[in-house]
Image: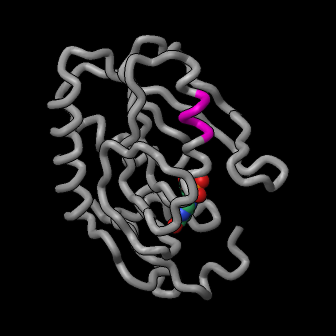
């Protein structure tokens, strides 16, 4: 199967290779399975960035589990940390062991808002699994239970992360050239 390729004008440097992602996702899946035996596991993903990670992660977790999706638009009225839910979960999470599966946590403001909202719905446990963690940019302290890779403060693309809606299908994570970001929203 041919893998999607990125133009040289976009990619500055590959930060995490496809092989590294595959190996780490397997490790994260094994840890999650080990920690959640016998629980009502729900993987919740915020569309659209987390989609690819979720698809691979859920197949690396050897447990019965359910997936559900939420979509948000950030930031309402330009206020960081205030998000509007554009698609809510389909199912109740009361009493469930919820793991929010994220592609990347940057400032943490979006996830912080979502976690507060989910907590009110009284899950048994509420955890976070993120593939990428830009921890140097963190503004709010978040409990991240499962972390794929810590990355530097650079805008990245691939494996679910987009530039202007494109390139989510790249199988690796790469930093983006400044020129390619000029004008990107
Ligand atoms: P936060 O609220 O943590 O600052 O922002 C989280 C959201 O910003 C992520 O879910 C993602 O959509 C977007 N984001 C943050 N950093 C990056 C990045 O390096 N690349 C891309 N494509 N999106 C990012």
**Residue 132, above or below 97:** below
Q: Name the residue located 52 percent from the left edge and 31 percent from the top edge.
A: 69
Q: Position of residue 49 (x, y in %)?
A: 51, 51
Q: Position of residue 35 (x, y in %)?
A: 20, 30
Say whether residue 165 is magenta.
no
Task: Single out the residue that lies furthest toward the right.
Answer: 77
Q: Residue furthest front?
A: 141
Point out the quarter of the image occupied by ligand 1.
bottom right
Task: Name the image quarter holding the N terminus.
Answer: bottom left
Q: What residue is rendered at 72% in x and 54% in y?
A: 80
The structure residue drawn at horizontal position 22% and vertical position 40%, both measured from the top left corner, is 29
Q: Residue at x 41, y 11 (%)?
A: 95
| 78 to 178, vertically: above or below | above
Q: Is residue 85 above or below residue 17?
A: above
Q: Which image quadrant is residue 134 in?
A: bottom left
Q: Nearer the viewer, residue 184 or 120?
A: 120
Question: On the image, which quarter does residue 179 sit in?
Answer: bottom right
Q: Over which residues does the magenta segment extend?
A: 113-117
The answer to whether residue 19 is left or right of residue 182 is: left
Say left or right for 74 vs 148.
right
Residue 151 percent coordinates (x, y): 38, 69
Q: Position of residue 58 (x, y in %)?
A: 30, 35
- Residue nearest the viewer, comparing 146 with 19: 146
């Amino acid at each position: 199967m041919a893998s999607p390729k990125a133009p040289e004008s976009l990619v500055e440097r590959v930060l995490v290779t496809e092989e590294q992602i595959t190996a780490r996702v397997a490790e994260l899946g094994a840890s999650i399975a080990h920690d959640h035996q016998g629980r009502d596991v729900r993987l919740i993903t915020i569309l659209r960035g987390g989609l690819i990670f979720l698809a691979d992660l859920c197949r690396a977790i050897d447990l019965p589990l359910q997936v559900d999706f939420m979509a948000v638009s950030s930031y309402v009225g330009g206020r960081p940390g205030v998000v509007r839910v554009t698609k809510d979960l389909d199912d109740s999470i009361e009493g469930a062991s919820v793991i929010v599966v994220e592609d990347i946590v940057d400032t943490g403001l979006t996830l912080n808002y979502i976690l507060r909202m989910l907590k009110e719905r009284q899950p048994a446990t509420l955890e976070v699994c993120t593939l990428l963690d830009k921890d140097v940019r963190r503004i709010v302290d978040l409990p991240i239970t499962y972390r794929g890779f810590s990355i530097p403060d650079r805008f990245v693309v691939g494996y679910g992360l987009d530039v202007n809606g494109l390139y989510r299908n790249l199988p690796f994570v790469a930093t983006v050239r400044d020129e390619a970001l000029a004008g990107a929203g």
